[in-house]
Image (tube, rainbow, N blue to C red):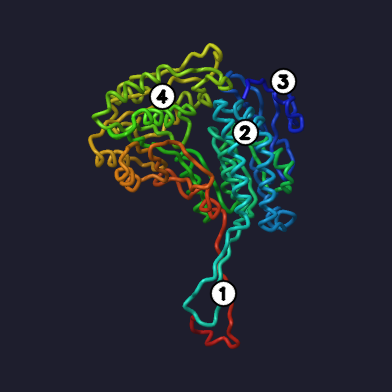
Amino acid sequence: MQRIETHAFIQEFPKLAAQPVDAAGQLVYTQFIDGEFTPAAGERLPTVDPVSGEQWATIARGTRDDVDAAVRAAQRAFEGGEWAAMNPSQRGAVLRRIGDLVTEHAEWLAHVEQRDNGKLSAELSMQMRYMANYYYYYGGLADKIEGTVVPTDKAGVFNYTVYEPLGVVACITPWNSPLPLASMKIAPGLAAGNTVVLKPSEFTSASLLELMKLFQLAGVPKGVVNVVTGLGAEVGEALVGHPLVARIAFTGGPEAGQRINEQAARHMKRVTLELGGKSPNIVFEDADLDNALKGAVAGIFAASGQTCVAGSRLLLQESIHDEFLARLVEIAKNVRFGHPADPDTQVAPISTEPQLRKVESYVAIAKEDGARLVAGGQRAEVPDCPKGLFFQPTIFADVNNRMRIAQEEVFGPILSVIKFKDEAEAIAIANDIEFGLAAGVWTESMPRALRMAGKVRAGTVWINNYRSTSVTSPFGGFKMSGVGRECGIAGMREYMEIKSVWLSMETNIPNPFVRR
């Protein structure tokens, strides 16, 4: 993916470039409600490029009224009209058309996503192309969710189960991977027959609105998918509290997730919550250390640490601790910064200014708690991007697992290195955390690998690899890392309700005062 300025890459995709430009030459994004791009009545919010530090677009600051309009459009589409009349095979065909269009326009989507959050082109190109698989997979699964005939212990009745859609689903997504995380929710939600209202992060809304143009081209009926942009306290809370919303699917921080869960519980709404983690990446003395080093780097410095599964706690067995740490520090000190569109760049910027300040604050916290800084620890100066939000890969040694730097999610390129003696201590340290999203284990011993996989309390355990994911495999966390699962068949069932149907075969119903 080459480095291309906004107006240049608009010209490459004229079929999709319908965005107006304001007097300052910045793109003006509107909301997407009931199949149309609709201006909001309220103010506008800036969209800043983390690479240049410059504003390049604005988005609508949605209101409670905008949320209500979007939810009611979704409810109308769910209850009647073209979408409600489609059978599962027809819905699957629509999803597969979306997949084709995502594949065709992957480079376009990657450019917009990069302008919004600054990720490396190498990662974005892969993510955008893989994203089509969500629509292909769930498009194929749409007509394959089967109920069962239940062999009950009651005579004279026939019992069977069916799966049905829930209704309007609210999807709230973060800024680190806007389109993949949105598609992870949209695709199973639609395959199940629901309709959707999305609220993207106010920092990264543009790419999702570009995706809606592909939904239009795919023939998604009006009202089936809607996007309301704006602030969490305004749009997000209104969406979660709307009486017509049946389910909330949220990816973000635990504090916001708790508030959503509490609000949803008051109305018995279903939730899927993916709330991040503080994942242990555990290296034993018998591991292939070259591969484990790559796994440690991938776990925390890939995507500048801005990933929910970041292996931000590196647990090293005593016998290899010093050698491994020295090699890792050398790698961290020699990474290549630059524009994320340049293929030689290894480290991209932090996506937002508030997040960069948070990362800086945790360096100070770690020092105060007694951790020893051995690499990084400050903003990086990148001549090619002088206003970019870059931060050096940072490593703290001599970390105690009770320190805040080991217990709290930073969401940045900060690694806590913790020493352990044996397998039992590694398990104790790994589980001594309120999170439980993911874990990595590096060992050449198959028995040890299986023991660790069974004892570490995490929704995903990687053995001799890190950050592998698939649309076919369920993803989610234990403990404070969340509720429910995304991806795989389990992910689609989250968007459906099971109904039990009892059919009497009796010609004469027995005593009605006695339960059968």
Q: Which residue is mark 3?
A: 25
| Up-down relation of residue 255 to residue 411 (above or below) | below
Q: Nearer the viewer, mark 1 or mark 3?
A: 1
Is residue 455 among the parts visible in the rendering?
yes
Q: Nearer the viewer, mark 1 or mark 2?
A: 1
Residue 423: % across, % down: 26, 40
Residue 466: which quarter of the image? Answer: top left
Instruction: Report if the CB atoms under discs 3 and 4 are less than 8 Å apart.
Output: no
Q: Nearer the viewer, residue 474 or 30?
A: 474
Which of disc 2 and disc 4 is earlier in sequence?
2
Task: Indicate left or right for 232 with 294 as reference.
Answer: right
Which of disc 2 and disc 1 is earlier in sequence?
2
Residue 37 marker: none
Residue 368: % across, % down: 31, 23
- Identified by mark 2, the residue type is Ser
- Identified by mark 3, the residue type is Gly
In terms of secondary structure, where does tag 2 sit? Answer: loop
Which of disc 3 and disc 2 is earlier in sequence?
3
- CA–CA distance in space, label 1 to label 2: 47 Å
